[in-house]
Image (cartoon, grey):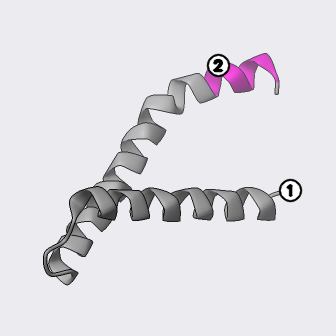
Amino acid sequence: MSDIQNIEIERYQDNITEDIRKVVEKYREIMAWDVPDNDTVEADRLIFQAIYSALAEIEKSSK
């Protein structure tokens, strides 16, 4: 990665983090609506697992 790319990604890091936070919150709310007696800790674990899996799939397909 070039120096310019490193500088650029550093500029976007906070935005990326905030975007992912919003995705987690979105699916946390959806699970709370759809799952009676929703366990928020378990919901978060499942959401994070799904995000990690999606990222791995996206990374694999981009190579």
10 lies above or below 26:
above
What's the residue at 23%, 60% (across, down)? 40
Give SS at disc 1.
loop
Camera-side mark, 2 or 1: 1
Magenta stretch encompasses residue 6 = yes
Residue 2 position, x and y percent, is 82, 22
Within 10 angstroms of label 2, few (less than 14), some, or many (20 or more) residues? Answer: few
5 lies above or below 44:
above
What's the residue at 60%, 63% (across, down)? 53
Q: Quadrant of residue 17?
A: top left
Q: Quadrant of residue 28?
A: bottom left
Q: Which residue is mark 2?
A: 7
State the quadrant of the C terminus: bottom right
Q: Quadrant of residue 36?
A: bottom left
Q: Which residues are magenta?
A: 2-8
In the visual, does 24 lie left or right of 17?
left
58 lies above or below 12:
below
47 lies above or below 2:
below
State the quadrant of the N terminus: top right
In the visual, does 13 lie left or right of 38?
right
Give SS at disc 2.
helix
Q: Is most of the magenta stretch helix, strand or loop?
A: helix
Residue 37 position, x and y percent, is 13, 75
What's the residue at 31%, 66% (across, down)? 27
Q: Which residue is mark 1?
A: 63
Residue 21 position, x and y percent, is 35, 47
